[in-house]
Image (cartoon, rainbow, N blue to C red):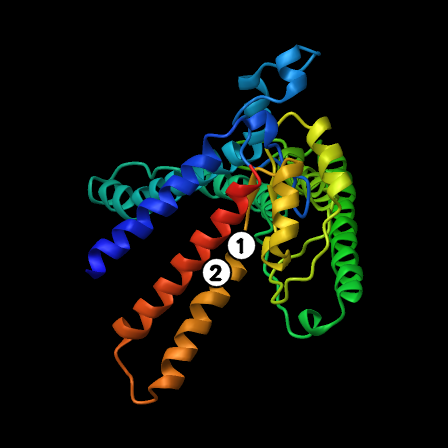
Amino acid sequence: MRLSSDAARTDEMLEAMIAIWTRDPVKSAGTPTSTLPASAGRGRGPRQREGEGQPPARARDIILLLPKILVTALLVLAVADMLIGVFLRYVMVEITDFLDLDPINFFWVEEIGEYSLAWLTMIGAGIAIGERAHFTLHLVTHRLPRAAQRVIHIAGHLLIVGFGALTAWYGLQLAIVNSLLTSPALELNLAWLYAAPAVGGVLIVLYALAVAVGSSHAMLTRDAVLDEDLIAEIHRAVPVPLVLHGSSGVPDAGLAAAVAAGMTKINVATRLNKAFTGAVRACLAADPALVDPRRYGAAARDAVAAEVTRLLGVLCAAC
């Protein structure tokens, strides 16, 4: 009986998800807490369909994904460089010593590692700002009035912008100063090393200045008020699907209005975390002697599934 009930709930959730994912992207290009691409190129905007000078979809997708592509390539390079360095240092050195051969020069390994990690760190920092994946700690702000939260949220992003601008400026100056110097092993121009903070700083500034529409992360109360006119304006101007971060703080009516205005992807992690944790607390409060995580874990999963189903119903009704 429990299995059939779970299967029915799963079918209902899947049908709701499919209804959202298969809707016309032209009607669903949204905007995040910051206006950033949700998934580059998933669908075409009105201007692209009308051919008003938009770049080809594949070229635009590559441009939007370029920082992530670079970070992935740099990560592969750094790992490969590390493995080669370990092999040369601990295997080939022993072999050359045993055979009384000239030692292999592997000092270039350290230089490649330095360059790749510098670029990986700075580009990754920009991506983290764009994805809102940087570390945040909420101790007091979530208890403040909504207006105060908004001011703090904007001030925080302005500080990030300032940090990115300083990083870009001094990175550029260092790149210029060191442009006549080369690395000792591979003789690589040191300007390439110091250009990493300049590029990363620019990315941080661009992502941190993304347009805010009224929501913010990790809200425990649902009293955020979205700027629906701004959402609609961005929807008309931007030919790619976008995402609304911080949707947990938006009431159902606001979510429905946002979807109707053009939102594509709605992030509600905090809302689901709250449902999960609340169910666990209620279960343990009802039975203080309970120690089996399978029992309160099942209650938590049911609570999350019920909330997901309810939210999907709200969003689908606005499609």
Residue 258, by quadrant, is top right
Q: Pick the residue in front: 142 or 160.
A: 142
Q: Residues within 10 Å of mark 2 (few under 14, many from 20)?
A: many
Q: Where is residue 181 in the image (x, y as percent from the top left)?
A: 67, 34
Residue 88 place in picture, x, y as percent = 32, 42
Q: Which of 106 and 194 is in front in this view?
A: 194
Q: In which quadrant of the rendered image does the C terminus lie?
A: top right
Q: Which residue is denoted by mark 2 in the rendering?
A: 272
Q: Is residue 87 left or right of residue 112?
A: left
Amino acid type shown at disc 1: Val
Res 268 label: 1
Question: Judging from the image, what secondary structure is the residue with disc 2 in?
Answer: helix
Residue 149, position as x, y percentages in the image:
75, 64
Quarter of the figure with the N terminus: bottom left
Q: Residue at x 31, y 45 (%)?
A: 11
47 w.r.t. 123: above or below: above
Q: Is mark 1 on a helix, strand or loop?
A: loop
Q: Looking at the image, which residue is at 33% across and 86% down?
A: 287
Res. 213 mark: none
In the rendered view, tell whether residue 293 sits above or below residue 95: below
Q: Tell me the residue at 46%/34% (across/down).
A: 21
Q: Which residue lies furthest to the bottom in this view?
A: 289
Horizontal side of residue 296 vs 312, given as left or right? left
Circle 2: residue type: Leu
- Residue 211 lies left or right of residue 268; in this view the side is right
Q: Do the residues labelled 2 and 1 touch (CB within 8 Å)?
A: yes
